[in-house]
Amino acid sequence: MPILGAFMVPHPPIMLPEVGNGEEKKIAEVTAAYEQVADEIASLKPDTIVISSPHSIMYADYFHISPGKTAYGDMGKFNAEEVSFDAEYDTELVDEICRIAEMGGADASEKDDSKDGQKGLALHEFPAGTMGERDPRLDHGTIIPLYYICKKYTDFKLVRIGLSGLPLALHYQMGQIIQKAVNNTGRRIVYVASGDLSHKMKEEGPYGFAPEGPQYDERIMEVCGRGDFKRLFEFEDSFCEKAAECGHRSFVMMAGALDGLSVKAEALVHAATFGVGYGICRFEVGGPDDSRHFLDIWRKEKLEELRKRQKDEDPYVKIARYSLESYVNAGKTLHVKDITGGKPGVSAKKSLDTDFENSTASDVGNGLDTDESGFDLGKLPEELFSQKAGAFVSIHKNGALRGCIGTISPTCDCVAEEILQNAISAGTNDPRFPMITPDELPWLEISVDVLDEPEPISSPDQLDVKRYGVIVRNGFKKGLLLPNLDGVDSVIQQINIACQKAGIPKGEEISLERFEVVRHI
């Protein structure tokens, strides 16, 4: 097979004698495992080594592939300028990766029918390429693997790829694109996924301790030690953030490069001597194995889970979803009369087909059609039409925010109308995201927050991130953050994020308001 093997390795500068000055002896078992990896790579004799590094150039919405013919890097910022490398890039393989990305990554899966909304970018350019290089020098996440490999083997070219802020599914797809490019060029490659584990392993460590730190390390070593790559998608963003992990997306990209191939996995070592987790695993690659198309498996399971969840959605969420789907599929802006026929409190059923594989724009917005295949809104509560309130509609996809827009105070005649309008805005007018497309609709998780009237407060002590949302004001600038959000654990953090959203500089005087919400899911 062109992909000869793969390795998950850390990149602690202290591991190098030139940097550690004797401290490296405390993690001698990690060094020994690294040397075993280098010996194995030398025995495989690859034409090219592909390294994904968390410390290469990273963008929120783009995978950066290092351009050019050569690159240089050293460990000068760790006071070891004598540790340096000149690398020759595999320009042909880079060009082929970029070509497939320009085609939308469709080559990454021969079975892509683009109906599930997760291949996602199959009709558009996949967000990867050589644009946007800010610093051509090799980073330490690349140099440290090279330090050990080049002691044993040097007859190879390099491909260096950075991570992104995009969802895990797209990191896996990036790996699939790499595999396709490797197959097309006939290269014999080894994949090296560079990445430390949790940085929160010990109180006395440089980054302190969090209980999620040891939990992450235990889970990731068990998952990768068994080669059970589907479980890589089960690591929630908020959990990974609290664990302060470094390499998870690198490991997912590696898993994508091994998609559909048999793998014999082995965990070689784990250590957390300095309060940071270092793990090394090896992956012996075999022939095709149709049971290991993990992204396809995960998508099917996720879609079924979402379908079941959507059947049980709160009526507030159902009308938000119906409004968004009507607009995206058919360009129809719904109003209260379109969902009730002017009869609040009755059961309403619309002809929006919930068979996501077969729905079409003609299924949307046809009045009070009671076809059994229709979009069942259920019995709509009277208060949707009798009460006024501000409301926020939040949209997530793959656990990541996909849109959120709302109104602090009521702007419409009733809550239902507020939700209908804000659902469209959240999906099509949030300036942080492109407009939602029809193929994304089945994958969206929607929540609706109905706001109580905000009240002024005199001190942050009157806030509670779980109970209260916050509004910050400075002149004409105003920012809002909803309560009980994943990853927002303190009042100071809540206020700072609200200020950032408002464009209020740090240290500027602000006034505060708080509000409670009723969250519908």
Image (cartoon, helix red, strand yellow):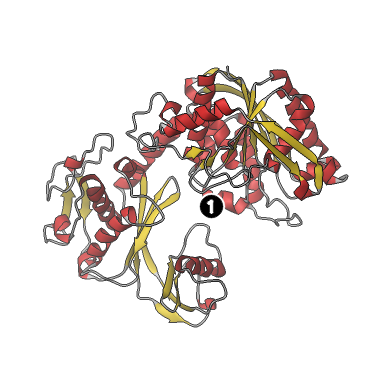
Answer above or below: position of 49 versus 472: above
Question: From this viewpoint, which residue is outermost toward the front?
Answer: 69
Comparing 294 with 251, the one in front is: 251
- Residue 513 in view: yes
Q: Position of residue 190 (x, y in %)?
A: 64, 25
Residue 479 placement (x, y as % from top left): 43, 70
Residue placed under numbered mark 1 in the picture = 238
Tell me if residue 508 comes above or below residue 67 in the rendering. below
Residue at the image point whose x is 43% and y is 26% from the top: 107
Residue 34 placed where, x, y %? Answer: 75, 32
Residue furthest out toward the bottom: 458
Left or right of 80? Residue 404 is left
Question: Viewer-proximal residue, 364 or 110?
Answer: 110
Instruction: Identify the element where label 1 is drawn.
Output: helix
The amino acid type of the residue labelled 1 equals: Ser
In the picture, measured across the screen, residue 283 lies left or right of residue 408, that is right
Query: What is the count of numbered marks?
Result: 1
**Residue 447 position (above or below residue 147):** below
**On the image, which quarter does residue 438 sit in?**
top left
Callout 1 crowding tier (Cα within 10 Å): few <14, some 14–19, many ≥20: some
For residue 297, which quarter of the picture?
top left
Q: Which residue is drawn at 34% across and 32% down?
A: 114
Spot the residue most to the right: 22
Image point (76%, 29%), residue name: 150
Name the one closer to the observer, 190 or 379.
190
Q: Quadrant of the C terminus?
A: bottom left
